[in-house]
Image (cartoon, grey):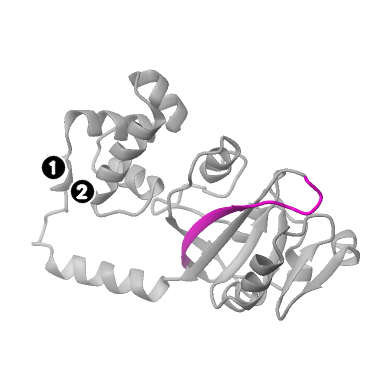
Amino acid sequence: MGGPARDLRDVGQGSRYMGQTRVANDGLHQALARAGDGAFAVGPEGRVALWNRSAEKILGWSAREVLGRPCGEVLVGVDARKNGVCDGGCDVAGQFRLGQPVVRFQMEARTKAGRPIWLDLSVLEAPVTNGGRPLAIHLFRDITDTKRLLEMVQERLRPNGQTNGNGAMRLTRREVEILRLMALGANTKALAEQLHVSPATVRNHAQNIFSKLEVHSRLEAVAWANRHRLV
């Protein structure tokens, strides 16, 4: 970690960034530094380029420890079925590179101490000062307690011996088809080409699927499909 530490810069009241990848908008940079939510930026190569103090408080890693490291190596993110999220095949990174909007999503990560923690993440694009490819700014909150409370409530409201499979009954044939293809790894572009529709139509179907299944992301929808043997 010697290299990244030497190239470290201070920003505002509480974030650190790599010298050549600073967000171009100073107002946005200051807002990220002061944000109560955790914030980190990932460059085109998948390495952490910015880390604010709230991120340090939530996950336990200091900026000096994470800057320049692969994002997945720090977060070790998995979905509800413990499938890897933060890896070379990161769906968020793929959508971002293609210029597609990233749906808000949730995942289980690990703190520096190894404690499991559920994060609710949103991603936005930010240009950089050196004119290179934009950074993917990740904003996140710790929703571990909320997640556990909801699971407890759902479990107690569920009749004994039954699983919540009613969502599938509300899906249209097209939505089931899209959900199955999602579970097989198809991204928005591939789905649009295979179904001969526009990417916008695919995204609309995806939002309807999320709403009907009461999930918040593609990852959770795929986990639901696997859990209920839809694939």
The picture quadrant where one finds residue 183 is: top left
Q: Residue at x 22, y 28 (%)?
A: 174
User: Residue 184, how many percent across, how many down?
Assistant: 40, 30
Q: Position of residue 125 (x, y in %)?
A: 60, 51
Q: Which secondary structure lies at badge 1?
A: helix
User: Label for residue 170?
Assistant: 1
Residue at position x 36%, y 50% in the image: 220
Magenta-tinted stretch = 118-131
- Residue type, numbered disc 2: Lys
What residue is drawn where x is 47% and y is 65%? Answer: 119
30 above or below 70? below
User: Magenta stretch: residue 184 in it?
Assistant: no
Badge 1: residue crowd in 10 Å (few <14, some 14–19, many ≥20) = few
Amino acid at pointer 1: Arg
The residue beneath circle 2 is 212
Figure quadrant of the C terminus: top left
